[in-house]
């Protein structure tokens, strides 16, 4: 198998960190999104959504979507458990991961998509909307405040232990900080306490 | 346990259909979103995201997010299987379900959020963006064409059998058709063949 991905893009990093936590090595193949490789007919056959990462199995089966890929590896390599084991724990991790994706990562993505770095890529492909950028920024900042309050009550984003939801949150905060000018405020001290801890794990370098 | 939900809203219907497929009955409690009940302090304690549905367990534990709730019931009542069993099948169902959510349901939601029915609710709470409505509509229509092509090759959206991804697709198409003026074109005959079949299942009335 091999993972089609791109260094520097947030979603592939989620899978790389997940694999590092599992101690699993998978060959990485770069897809050059800046050259539009993810929109070529050859790539769209692998993933009609035109997005990375994609896990390509030896029989040619392709699995897109970071969380679908991570769940696949969770099934093959159950330990350390990252998606939860008892049904209630698994449900709360799934809930947290999805809220982070739909409310924080999607908002940061909206700010990114309508922001300056994407402007050149967008030209002729889609119209950037300044007001949507503002809404994305506002929603992300509101979620940071919520996250900070939750991290004052528990060590990790979904509770007492490190899970896939921490990977989503870490990658999102780093993406927002480094590429979208949406760094969480310094006063969110519980968020930054958590960020320092999860960033210190060896997997964060993946 | 009880399910906090609202008749007529798309996401709670996903859970109701899922429960009907499982043959599980859960007491339903209406949350009046038109009166803003989902933004009250009492509700936000149950789900800080201020969204329905929420499954409230007897010990007070609350699980938000439709798919997290469905996974919880899949764990408690494994048959009929709706999330996939072998890891590759489960990964492909998860991929399909997530692509439907992020690329179709989210696009329909953007058109809805920036459309006429929400205008009165939005007043004073957020700014509607006409251009975002257009982008949501265009993205949804493009996804319908993809879905039609996929349904020409396989009976259900994730392959050979009915899964949670069909529930997501059915609820999204019905929401788009009935409330967002985004009915798929009549010429998408494979999509409509599938729609007629899944709509004929008793669970579709849930």
Image: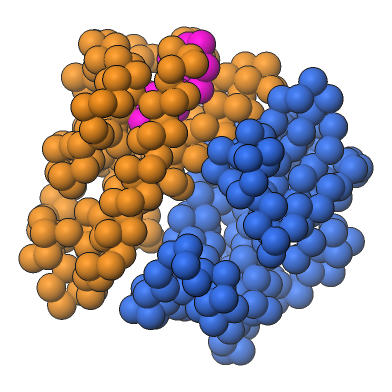
Chain colours: A orange, B blue
Q: Is residue B150 magenta?
A: no
Could you tell me residue B205's position as x and y percent? 86, 64
Q: Is residue A178 left or right of residue A172?
A: left
Could you tell me residue A38's position as x and y percent? 23, 56
Magenta range is A156-169
One can see residue A128 in this view: yes
Which image quarter is the N terminus of chain A in? top left
Q: Is residue A171 left or right of residue B140?
A: left
Could you tell me residue A74's position as x and y percent? 49, 22
What residue is shown at x 60% (from left), y 27% (from top)?
A92
What residue is shown at x 52% (from left), y 55% (from top)?
B101
What residue is shown at x 63% (from left), y 40% (from top)?
B41
Q: Is residue B190 left or right of residue A56?
A: right
Q: Is residue B113 above or below residue B186?
A: above
Viewer-closest of B126 and A35: B126
Q: Is residue A177 above or below residue A77?
A: below
Q: Is residue B105 left or right of residue B134?
A: right
Q: Is residue A167 magenta?
A: yes
Could you tell me residue A82's position as x and y percent? 48, 19
What residue is shown at x 61% (from left), y 89% (from top)?
B186
């Amino acid at each position: 198998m091999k993972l089609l991905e791109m260094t520097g893009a947030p979603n592939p990093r989620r899978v790389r960190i997940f694999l590092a936590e599992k101690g699993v090595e998978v060959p990485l193949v770069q897809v050059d999104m800046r050259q539009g490789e993810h929109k070529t007919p050859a790539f769209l056959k692998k993933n009609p959504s035109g997005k990375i990462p994609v896990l390509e199995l030896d029989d040619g089966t392709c699995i897109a979507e970071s969380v679908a890929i991570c769940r696949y590896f969770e099934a093959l390599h159950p330990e350390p458990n990252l998606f939860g084991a008892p049904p209630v724990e698994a449900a709360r991790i799934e809930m947290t991961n999805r809220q982070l994706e739909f409310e924080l990562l999607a908002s940061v993505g909206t700010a990114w998509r309508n922001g300056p770095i994407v402007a050149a890529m967008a030209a002729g492909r889609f119209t950037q909307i300044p007001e949507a950028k503002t809404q994305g920024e506002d929603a992300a900042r509101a979620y940071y405040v919520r996250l900070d309050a939750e991290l004052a009550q528990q060590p990790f984003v979904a509770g007492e232990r490190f899970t896939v939801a921490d990977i989503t949150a870490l990658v999102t905060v780093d993406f927002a900080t480094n590429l979208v000018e949406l760094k969480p405020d310094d006063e969110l001290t519980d968020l930054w306490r958590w960020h320092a801890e999860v960033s210190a794990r060896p997997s964060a370098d993946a």
